[in-house]
Amino acid sequence: MTQFKRATIGILILAGILFTGIASSEPPPERFEALPLAWVEPKGVVKITECFPHQGEHFAKLKDLEQFPVGPIYTVYNGQLTSIEYVFAKEDLEKQSSWKNLKFIYHGREVPIQHMDVDYLPDIFPVETYAIHFYVITHGAERSIECN
């Protein structure tokens, strides 16, 4: 099996695990019931990019950008949280690395994941990466995000 196929399989398995949730001995946090979620920067979170089409602006704690996986990164558009993103180095996926207990928490509450996108990012970071966006908005709403 080629490294590309192994990496692709690894990404799909990782995304499936993250999307369905990872078993934990901790009690589950309270979930948000109403959408959309108004954006209020969590403590220590700063804006790291301007608007990207279909995503919005990106916000994160600078310490969460220091090593892979990068994240959580919050994407925001028109004052609403649109997704939580994690970025994985392609080489880590090819090595079949594992990550556990990645959080989808906003202000202490679990966000309701509506769908996810996996994007190959060959030149955003010093190494090739894959970004996985876990959206709290519909696919149609995501596709309608335009930047001025």
Image: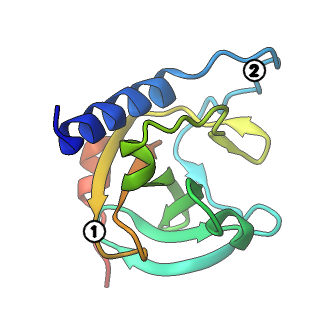
Horizontally, residue 147 falls left or right of residue 38, namely left
Residue 66 position in % (x across, y down): 65, 69
**Residue 147 to residue 53: above or below:** below
Q: Earlier in the sequence, mark 2 or mark 1?
A: 2
Q: Is residue 45 above or below residue 85?
A: below
Assign the N terminus to one quadrant of the image.
Answer: top left
Query: Which corner quadrant of the image does residue 122 belong to?
Result: bottom left
Please report the residue visible at 70 percent of the width from the left and 62 percent of the height from the top: 40
| Residue nearest the viewer, comparing 13 with 57 | 13
Q: Say whether residue 55 is left or right of residue 146.
A: right
Q: Quadrant of residue 68?
A: bottom right
Residue density around tag 2, few if under 14, some if 14–19, many if 20 or more, within 10 Å: few
Residue 137: tell me if it is visible: no
Say what amino acid the circle numbered 1 marks: Pro
* 146 displayed left or right of 116: left
How far is mark 2 from mark 1, CA to CA? 35 Å
- Residue 122: mark: 1
Colouring scheme, one of rainbow, by chain, secondary structure, one colour: rainbow
Residue drawn at (40%, 33%) of the image? 15
Q: Is residue 97 left or right of residue 131?
A: right
Q: Residue at x 42, y 42 (%)?
A: 95
Percent coordinates x, y for residue 76 in the rendering: 51, 64
User: Dot 1: what SS?
Assistant: loop
Which residue type does callout 2 highlight? Pro
For the C terminus, the image quarter is bottom left
From the viewer's perspective, is residue 47 above or below residue 14? below
Please give the name of the residue rendered at 31% of the width and 47% of the height, measured from the top-left corner: 118
Tell me the element at label 2. Answer: loop
Marking on residue 28: 2
Q: From the viewer's perspective, is the residue at label 2 or at label 1 nearer?
A: 1
Q: Position of residue 79 (x, y in %)?
A: 55, 66
